[in-house]
Image: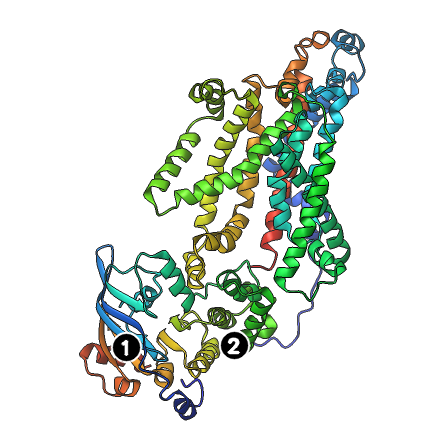
Amino acid sequence: MSIVKYKKTAPRDAPLSETTFIGWLQKNLFSSWVNTILTIISLYIVYAVVKSLWFWGIQDAVWVAENRRECFAISKHGACWAGVLIWLDNIFYGRFPRDELWRVNLGGLLLVLWMAPLWLPRVKDKIFIGLSTVFLYPFLAGYLFAGGDKGIFMQVMVSGAIVCLAGNTLHSILGVMSGRGLPEVLIGILRKENASDGNQRNTLLVILAVAYVIAYALQTSWSVMAVPWSKWGGMHLTLVISGIGITSALPGGIVLALGRRSRLPVIRVLSVSFIEIFRSVPLITVLFMATTMFPLFMPEGFVLNKLVQVIIAVCLFSACYMAETVRAGLQAIPKGQYEAAHTIGLGYWGMMSLIVMPQALKHMIPNIVGSFIGLLKDTTLVSIIGLFDLLGMLRAISQDIPWRGLHHEPLIFGAALYFVVCFVMSKYSRHLEVKLSAGGER
Amino acid sequence: MTAVDGQETQAQLASAASSEVIIELNEVNKWFGSFHVLKDINLTVHKGERIVVCGPSGSGKSTLIRCINRLEEHQRGDIVVDGIILDKNLKNIDHIRSEVGMVFQSFNLFPHLSIIENLTLGPIWVRKVPKAEARDIAMSYLERVKIPEQAEKYPGQLSGGQQQRVAIARSLCMNPKIMLFDEPTSALDPEMIKEVLDVMVELATTGMTMIVVTHEMGFAKTIADRVIFMDEGDIVEQNEPNEFFNNPKSDRTKLFLSQILTH
């Protein structure tokens, strides 16, 4: 028996339900009576919510007023955004002196400038740029925010940060323009392309040293007035605490995770108990412990300010959570990768830093961003122990005499702010995940 | 199968082995938990010798060669590689591992690095070879395994046979004294087995000391100086290939050969 089709079948147009909007509507929203009723009910709920939000939040809202009484006088049923708007500076900067706000803005701007090369094409040595952001930027920003007298240590670190920032920026501009790195260009200018590796390295080190001396000389004549930490607050404080927590969580988490997988029992037991203790306690408990118990263990006369205590607590807490994320990432790496690294003679640290970690970090990106988002939100807890972070500032509005009792509007504003930041972060992590897995690298 | 013209290769291969001992296993025993996987193994390998290890699965042949670069730790007996006793001394182990190349069944290339980076990683970080020089060495080995045009690609973009050839080149870049192959063709499609075996035969003609765990009996006949048959943790029989295949002595060997050669 043979079945033969001699003619080719020509393609025909798809049915309307596959290609038109009406078809889509019918297929997905009105396919049966039950679905139609559900669709109509849902649409009505959405309409009702949006309508009342619109009238309360925008149509009847008051944007300019001196105090809450005036708000009521203008519109009885609308939101009173005037209070939020007048407090806007406080919400973002806390009680930072108003003449010094440029320092906070400059700090943010420098961070953008420092990290922007990571997203630019054709820039080389991005790992170095990332590391320098983590290890040097905090000192520069820290001095900008705190100000006052620079100790010798701060002087050294701030000059290092300035040199690094200048180098990074030049390097990235050159990279985008010509695809070459700063060291390459410098060697080219000095006509040392053909010199030995050692000679080239020494030349670069001399240039670096000269740049450092210049930066050091420049920064000695530059200082800004001191702002005590108790004046920090609002969004700024939230970002400082969570930023430090986030940047220290990753290295801390990696160390703890490696410790947990160590073959030496003492290190393993120590890491496991450290991780488990912090993970089994809520953050608020850790914060109370840090601010009330920690000083008891310190020698007499050793006083840490509350902010530093809080930051230490947040760092330890987030490092422990990160350790579990890192551990999961490490477990996703097949045993063969470890063995292959061994057989080409790499030792433990070479294997971890060149082979295992780069692959594991890629697996971990969604989880890392997830815990970063979590940490950003968790830092609102510091308002409970008396720091005026974003949430603290929002609640303070209702205590302010002209705006007494204004609870809803600031909190809704805060929720919107958090939503925007967290949503952008999670979208970006999704994008990163897709990009890395589609990179043709596996 | 014969990977290259048999007679010619045999002539090139003759008398490659010297009298210098490069690996010595003395009463080696290993247990996985309570399971006794290697039992009183004695083995002497001379420089330039090519040894094929065969046997049923679970017979301990992979474990044997993995003990030689201490991917597995043996519990009793001594293993001496290139004059160095393998013990807890980590420095010695790292040194031995850089002298002993290993090729795995599942290739184990580093997926996050390009082919050329896979090859230069060891020379640059372990041997401290300057980058440009490491690159030249890597390219010369890629040419030897006949895939220089793949240098900038990533392992995931290559076929299995190409990946395995890269893995061989990666080991060779470390300029090893000994090469261990752990079933290098078992995970490959039939048409790719030949290209990998060709590379291995070519390597054999250079006088490299090789220990190969494989089921490719044609390959064993072509290049081996000695065939070792293992079963249940024992070295049951070892002989030069002609004798081994045509005139096996023990019943276990006969049974094994009858099972694999009937197809």
Please determine whether, in this image, residue B62 is positioned above or below residue A272: below
- The reply to whether callout 2 and callout 1 are in contact (CB within 8 Å) is no
Chain of the residue under label 2: B
Q: How is the image coloured?
A: rainbow
Residue A91 at least partly seen: yes
Query: Within 10 angstroms of label 2, few (less than 14), some, or many (20 or more) residues?
Result: many
Sequence order check, earlier mark of 2 and 1:
2
Asked whether, in this view, residue A77 is left or right of residue A324, the answer is right
Q: Chain of mark 1?
A: B
Residue that carries the numbered disc 1 in the rendered image: B228
Residue A349, image x, y percentages: 46, 52
Percent across and percent down for residue A249 are: 52, 37
Point 72% across, 51% down: residue: A171
For marks 2 and 1, give the CA distance. Answer: 27 Å
In the picture provided, is B54 more to the left or to the right than B159? Answer: left
Q: Secondary structure at mark 1?
A: strand
What amino acid is at disc 2?
Answer: Val
Q: Which of the pair A189/A47 is nearer the observer?
A: A189
Picture coordinates of residue A337, whole percent (x, y) = 45, 58
Are there few (<14), some (14-19), or many (20+) residues within 10 Å of tag 1? many
Quarter of the image that includes the C terminus of chain B = bottom left
Q: Which residue is mark 2?
A: B145
Q: Eyeballing the image, is B49 above or below A372?
A: below
Q: Is residue A355 above or below residue A11?
A: above
Position of residue A202 measured from the top left corner of the image (x, y, whole percent): 64, 56
> At 22% from the left edge and 58% from the top edge, which residue is drawn?
B35
